[in-house]
Every structure is written in C-alpha cells, then in structure tokens.
Image (tube, grey):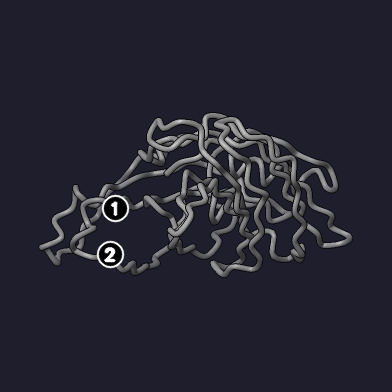
Amino acid sequence: MPDERRYLQSKFKKKTNNPKFEESYVFQVSYRNFNDRVLKLTVYDVDRIKKHHVIGHALYPLKDHDCESNERLVIWRDLEREVTETTSELKGELMVSLAYNNHLERLTVGIYEGRSLEVDGATPIDTYVKVVLMAQHKTIKSKKTEVIKKNANPVFNESFTFKLPSTSLDTANVTITAMQPQTGYKDKVIGKVTIGSFMFARGKELQHWNDMVANEREQVMNWHTLVS
C-alpha cells in the first residue's frame, strides 16, 4: 500500500483452521519510499463456487521495520474485520452503476452524477469522468463522459459498455477518475475510485462488484467516495 498495484497470492489450503503456507514473496520498494509503504495481508475463505469472503486483514507499516538489518523477522498480527486503508484526501463522490450480462459477456458502467467535485476549494470547475477497464493489470478499454461546465455537482447520465469474459471477472477492475480539463496543459485529476474483484478493491468498492456478479443483468447502483 498505499496504491495496492502489486499483489501476490498464496496457494489454497483446504479444510483447515490452522493453515501452513510456507511461501515467500518479493516486492520492489525503493529506500526513499520505504517508510511510506504498508504491507497489507488479507485472509479469505473460498467457498465451493470459488467466491471469496474476507475473514480479516492485517497491516504492517514498513516504518516499523529496520530496513538496514538483514535478519529475518517473525511477527504475529491479529486479523481485523476492517482496517484504515488510506489516508488520501477525499475528493467528492460519484454515483456509479454496474451491470453484467453473463450471456453477452458485457459489462455496463453508468456514471450518473457527482457531489462536491472541487479542486483546492476553488470556484465550480469543468469536469468529466474517465472510465478504464483493466484485467490482470492491463488496460483493456478507456472511455470518457462529456465535459460538464462549472458545476461542483455535475449530472452526467452516461453509460458505457465493455466486453468482459465471465472468466475474467475475478481479475478485472474498473478505475473511475473525475478529471478537470485544462487548455494547453495536461488534464488534472480531481479524484478516483477503483471498483473490482478481491484482487483490486476492498470495502464498499469490492461489495459493489460482488453484488453486480451475484445479480446478473441487474443494475446495481452506489455512491463512491473519490480519493486523491
């Protein structure tokens, strides 16, 4: 953490409450960023239909570790049901809908309206929303809404469809980013949210994705908080 772009997963251990994994993982972390990173471990129960249910999380801030030492450190951590996952500044909200048609292998993402989309407390700004479908950390398709002029609570009422095989539902996510267009400069990010499978999302964003999968062809709608 905090970006959660890199994840690794252990093998399944069946029918035991006291699993032994005996696995090692390697992450590249620069010395400069070491103290800002947090190692997050999430334990799942996997049911017969391969649906993942969170048992709990454990966090280990790397600032608590002596990175100059090459000694192997063994620690125990209690699992918590909820953990504070980000200290990023909140950047407003977006109302988003998801629907998946298993027969057509089609994902539909609806972007309806925003609340309190502001930049540094400035006067109402122009905004648009970019929607990016990713699978296995690769961008599949990117689409965007029309620009809404000078409104902190813009109404978009647009939807986008993406081709997504049902076999990819567990390795996919949708990143939704509110943007401020800038003439002559690179467009500015207001805030974003990632909604997706257990590999990419947590909390409300993961639940939204799971609800979409469980309610095939139904439109599932939620407000999501954007972070910087």
* Inter-mark Cα distance, 2 to 1: 8 Å
Is 217 displayed left or right of 45 in the figure?
right
Is residue 112 shown above or below 106?
A: above
What residue is drawn where x is 48% and y is 44%? 191
- Residue 212 appears at what percent x and percent y? 74, 45
Task: Give the residue pinned by disc 1.
Answer: 37
Q: Considering the numbered disc 2 on the image, is that residue within a helix, a strand or a loop?
A: loop
Specify the label residue 29 is tagged with. Answer: 2
On screen, residue 211 versus residue 174, left or right, reads: right
Taking the spot 60% from the left edge, 39% from the top edge, the residue there is: 149
Seen from the viewer's position, the closer of residues 131 and 173 is: 131
Q: Identify which residue, 104 or 187, lies in the foreground.
A: 187
Q: Position of residue 215 (x, y in %)?
A: 80, 43
| Residue depicted at 72% across the width and 41% down the height | 97
Seen as rendered, the residue at the extreme left is: 68
From this viewpoint, which residue is outermost toward the right?
103
Question: Circle 1: is it few (<14), some (14-19), or many (20+) Cα within 10 Å?
Answer: some
Image quadrant where residue 29 sits: bottom left
Tell me: residue 164, above or below residue 203. below
In front here: 196 or 129? 129
Element under disc 1? loop
How many tags in the picture? 2
Query: Measuring 31% from the left and 50% from the top, which residue is drawn there?
Result: 38
Residue 194 position, x and y percent, is: 55, 49
Q: Are marks 2 and 1 in contact (CB under 8 Å)?
A: yes
Q: Name the residue nearer the viewer: 145 or 46.
A: 145
Amino acid residing under circle 1: Arg
Residue 37 is situated, as x and y percent measured from the top left of the image, at 29, 53
